[in-house]
């Protein structure tokens, strides 16, 4: 084959074509996962939209089985709605969105998710996504969108005004897709429950294919604080990105470019960088050659620049984690811990950990003011409609990983969080653990990473890359929460050991009475009196 | 025929130069038993009362007992036996000890009942009695033995022994033959019963588990305490006790408390010298002989009564191996032997106080061999009677202490 012939075969590949062939990269590897990913992408978008608009999210998820291997997924939110003109591109074009070009903590990052879901639906059922959206004081619009896979462009099938759409604002997207529905781990149900844990401010209503309705009521009215957008930190950009930024900037001087396009760069730092790079402060950024850019890049790494601002992070916050866990995981003990924000490669991030431990319902021991211990059956709180997040005492703990409040359900073992959990010595905190494994115990471990840019290992956002800074922070945070758990477990064990010992007292004291009675010829009353007195002095003399 | 022979022999014994009839000071088969029983009962009551008073006053009851191990004994050659060094262990009633405490009180109650009804229980039986105590029962005899030892310790302060509390050991005491008459009594009729230890034929008188009530009469001039049944049989069969005018006691390994007490009474009450004849190995010396002479760490609280400080060591000594040409009848010392001997040299207060014994033990370690009593059979079965014992007895003054 000649170069010319080969040249004829060489042509542009559209992003959509690429992903159509590599759907697994986006989380559509199998029908079961496809259903989850579709819902996840839609819900993520809905939550982001609501929060950005300062609206307490109310999400409705409907999953209907329309054929043996076909499902119709509808996700509706009470968000601000999407302006009419943007609807087709948001849902019908890959890599179109508001989130990629800014550094701000949000669930979505790239602008792939929901359009990829639409694309998957279209590829497996021939039907593109349908969207109804209403902005306040405007008419609701209904679109039927078809994706042009080669051009990565939406084709609008139907565009109509809807007169009688109920809500005053919001968006509803409907996607038909080939899928299977199954409950259990990593199911839609699991995802929604975990979402409810990490987002206790949301109301989530879920109508499953079994026509069951499950409602996760919010545990708080407080919305998470709005995340602020930050400029990239010099340490966080790679050479290619730097070159692109140099080309695209409006700044006329190199010094101005650095100060405007990056955070934490003032005149002093800019001067330092430029000197280090042996360039001129007044150089024209767009004229910086590749070699010079390389020098600039190296100079940045060598210059001391303060860490990026961290007020851009919106952690779940301890009380909210607690509320979420208490709401969805019925346990005997809860512990939460938060780390101060930290930085990896110029990106600020923050780790939070929550632990729920111990299945209630077993015998509960109470210590009264006289120092006696009573055994009481603890009443189980009524969350009968939810699956139990807590495993059994002889099973590994349930690990719930969250990135910017989104549950990560797949690829647990590839995740930095899992690594950190395994590297933590849980024996110190009252849980069993074999070497290099998850700890064993009736517990749920919740780990949340909040960041302006979460380093996922793949586009399907399933596992967090193991940057040493991240693993370290997760470990420190786990240890912090672990210490609280350890203290509780030890106390619990102490009380139950004590209870056992006191059982001992009850068992054997009477024999001292009998013996003394036999030797001293005591009356039965005197004997019982002595035993009772002995019991009293013994029990009250023991502190717990 | 037997009767005639016996008479003759008796006459012969009496004719021996040192023959002198000795009796125990007071015939023991009298009211002393009842008096002892009374003091025992009172002691039990006292201990129980003490516990009860402590409970009444809202305190945690405590009982104290001496610590029982070799670390808590001291040896003074003037005293002659292991004495308690005075470390007292106090058991306060608390959760961890409530079971043992209850069992202690219940065993005391059992003791009281047995003393009152003039009965006894072997340690094994005591263990079985506890099976009726529901959750307070002992799971193994080891547990009840320990509690019994503790009780004995508690009562040691009042000079009352386990036997007085009517807990008797399983094993019977040693065998005795020779010119000795033991006066016991019929437990039912209280009639005295006299046992002539020269009239046991090829058998022997067996030391009962409790010996304090026995009366004794003798014409013997010394006591020979023998380690093994085999040697005892040989000496008995050939009537060595007659020839040498002595009482033979078979210890059968480490002598039981009853045997020790019995020999002690022969030594103390009848003023007879006591010689030990055991194997020449660390066990024979450091365990059997040491325990006979000064008692043990375990039973330090009762050693005052259960040992024979006047006993001396006839043999077999390491030097005997040389003197009697036993080299080719020895066995090499085992690792445990060496360890035992070294341990005795280092830790045993008795051997530490006896330079002669240190020399002897070091000699044995140096020779690296041990010799049994019966090794003399190498020179003929009765070499021991004809040569060894007479030779040794000529130099009784130089026996090891």
Image (cartoon, rainbow, N blue to C red):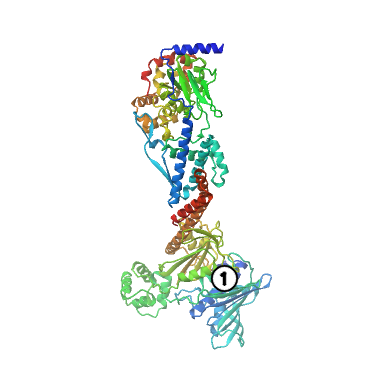
| Rendered location of residue B45, percent (x, y) | 46, 42
Residue A52 in sight here: yes
Instruction: Determine the image quadrant of residue B220.
Output: top left
Instruction: Name the one closer to the observer, B161 or A254.
Output: B161
Q: Chain of mark 1?
A: A
Q: The C terminus of chain A lies in which quarter of the figure?
A: bottom left
At mark 1, the secondary structure is: helix
Instruction: Name the one closer to the observer, B79 or A215.
Output: B79
Residue with the mark numbered 1 = A192
Residue A26 in sight here: no
Farthest residue to the right: give it: A68
| Rendered location of residue B292, percent (x, y) | 43, 27
Q: The N terminus of chain A lies in which quarter of the figure?
A: bottom right
* Above or below, A226 relative to A395: below
| Rendered location of residue A178, percent (x, y) | 64, 71
Residue depicted at 45% across the width and 67% down the height: A352
Instruction: Name the one closer to the observer, A105 or B284.
Output: B284
Residue depicted at 36% across the width and 19% down the height: B398
Judge the density around disc 1: few (<14), some (14-19), many (≥20) Cα neighbours within 10 Å. Answer: many
Q: Horizontally, is B378 left or right of A211 in the view?
A: left
| Rendered location of residue B204, percent (x, y) | 53, 21
Instruction: Name the one closer to the observer, A409 or A488.
Output: A488
């Amino acid at each position: 084959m000649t170069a010319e012939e080969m040249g004829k075969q060489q042509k542009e590949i559209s992003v959509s074509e690429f992903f159509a062939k590599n759907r697994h990269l986006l989380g559509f590897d199998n029908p079961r996962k496809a259903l989850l990913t579709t819902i996840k992408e839609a819900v993520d978008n809905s939550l982001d939209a609501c929060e950005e608009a300062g609206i307490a999210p109310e999400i409705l998820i409907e999953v209907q089985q329309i054929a043996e291997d076909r499902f119709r997924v509808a996700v509706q939110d009470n968000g601000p709605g999407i302006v009419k003109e943007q609807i087709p591109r948001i849902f019908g074009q890959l890599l179109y969105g508001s989130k990629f070009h800014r550094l701000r903590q949000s669930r979505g990052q790239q602008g792939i998710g929901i359009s990829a879901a639409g694309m998957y639906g279209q590829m497996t059922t021939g039907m593109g996504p349908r969207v109804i959206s209403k902005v306040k004081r405007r008419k609701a619009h209904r679109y039927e969108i078809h994706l042009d896979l080669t051009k990565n462009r939406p084709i609008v099938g139907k565009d109509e005004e809807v007169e009688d759409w109920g809500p005053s604002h919001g968006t509803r997207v409907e996607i038909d897709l080939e899928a299977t529905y199954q409950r259990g781990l990593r199911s839609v149900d699991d995802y929604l429950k975990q979402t409810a844990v990490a987002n206790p401010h949301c109301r989530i209503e879920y109508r499953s294919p079994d026509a069951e309705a499950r409602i996760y009521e919010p545990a708080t009215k407080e919305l998470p604080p709005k995340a602020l957008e930050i400029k990239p930190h010099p340490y966080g950009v790679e050479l290619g990105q730097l070159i692109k930024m140099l080309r695209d900037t409006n700044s006329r001087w190199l010094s101005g470019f650095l100060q405007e396009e990056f955070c934490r760069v003032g005149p002093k730092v800019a001067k330092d960088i430029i000197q280090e790079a042996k360039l001129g402060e007044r150089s024209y950024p767009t004229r910086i050659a590749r070699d010079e850019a390389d020098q600039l890049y190296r100079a940045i790494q060598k210059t001391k620049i303060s860490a990026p601002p961290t007020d851009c992070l919106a952690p779940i916050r301890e009380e909210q984690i607690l509320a979420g866990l208490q709401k969805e995981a019925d346990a005997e003990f809860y512990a939460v811990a938060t780390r101060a924000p930290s930085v990896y490669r110029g990106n600020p991030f923050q780790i939070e950990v929550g632990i729920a431990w111990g299945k209630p319902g077993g015998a509960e021991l109470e210590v009264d003011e006289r120092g006696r211990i009573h055994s009481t059956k603890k009443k189980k709180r009524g969350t009968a409609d939810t699956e139990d997040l807590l495993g059994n005492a002889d099973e590994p703990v349930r690990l719930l990983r969250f990135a910017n409040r989104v549950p990560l359900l797949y690829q647990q073992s590839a995740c930095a969080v899992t690594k950190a959990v395994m590297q933590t010595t849980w024996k110190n905190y009252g849980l069993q653990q074999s070497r290099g494994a998850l700890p064993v115990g009736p517990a749920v471990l919740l780990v949340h990473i909040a960041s302006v840019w979460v380093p996922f290992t793949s586009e399907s956002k399933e596992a967090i890359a193991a940057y040493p800074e991240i693993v370290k922070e997760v470990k420190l945070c786990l240890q912090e929460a672990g210490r609280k758990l350890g203290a509780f477990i030890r106390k619990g064990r102490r009380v139950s050991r004590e209870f056992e010992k006191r059982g001992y007292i009850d068992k054997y004291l009477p024999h001292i009475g009998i013996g003394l009675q036999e030797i001293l010829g005591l009356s039965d009353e005197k004997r019982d009196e002595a035993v009772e007195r002995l019991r009293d002095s013994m029990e009250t003399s023991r502190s717990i | 025929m037997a009767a005639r022979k016996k008479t003759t022999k008796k006459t012969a014994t009496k004719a021996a130069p040192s023959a002198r009839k000795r009796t125990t000071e007071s015939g023991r088969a009298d009211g002393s038993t009842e008096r002892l029983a009374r003091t025992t009962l009172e002691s039990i009551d006292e201990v129980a009362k003490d516990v009860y008073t402590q409970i009444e006053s809202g305190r945690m009851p405590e009982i104290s007992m001496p610590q029982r191990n070799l670390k808590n004994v001291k040896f003074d050659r003037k005293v002659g036996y292991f004495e308690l060094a005075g470390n007292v262990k106090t058991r306060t009633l608390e959760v961890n000890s409530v079971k043992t405490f209850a069992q202690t009180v219940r065993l005391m109650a059992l003791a009281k009942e047995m003393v009152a009804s003039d009965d006894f229980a072997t340690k094994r039986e005591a263990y079985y009695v506890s099976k009726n105590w529901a959750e307070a029962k002992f799971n193994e005899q080891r547990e009840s033995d320990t509690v019994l030892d503790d009780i004995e310790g508690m009562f040691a302060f009042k000079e009352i022994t386990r036997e007085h509390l009517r807990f008797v050991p399983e094993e019977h005491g040693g065998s005795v033959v020779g010119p000795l008459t033991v006066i016991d009594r019929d437990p039912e009729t209280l009639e005295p019963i006299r046992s002539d230890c020269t009239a046991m034929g090829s058998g022997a008188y067996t030391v009962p588990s409790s010996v304090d009530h026995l009366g004794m009469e003798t014409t013997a001039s010394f006591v020979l305490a023998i380690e093994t049944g085999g040697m005892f049989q040989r000496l008995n069969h050939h009537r060595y006790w007659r020839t040498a005018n002595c009482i033979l006691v078979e210890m059968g390994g480490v002598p039981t408390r009853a045997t020790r007490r019995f020999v002690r009474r022969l030594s103390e009450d009848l003023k007879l010298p006591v010689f030990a004849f055991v194997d020449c190995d660390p066990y024979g010396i450091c365990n059997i002989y040491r325990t006979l002479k000064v008692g043990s760490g375990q039973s330090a609280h009762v050693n005052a009564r259960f040992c024979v400080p006047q006993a001396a060591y006839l043999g077999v000594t390491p030097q005997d191996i040389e003197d009697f040409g036993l080299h080719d009848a020895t066995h090499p010392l085992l690792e445990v032997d060496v360890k035992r001997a070294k341990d005795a040299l280092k830790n045993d207060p008795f051997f530490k106080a006896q330079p002669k014994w240190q020399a002897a033990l070091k000699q044995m370690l140096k020779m690296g061999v041990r010799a049994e009593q019966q090794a003399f059979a190498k020179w003929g079965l009765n070499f021991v009677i004809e040569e060894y014992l007479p030779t040794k007895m000529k130099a009784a003054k130089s026996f090891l202490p």
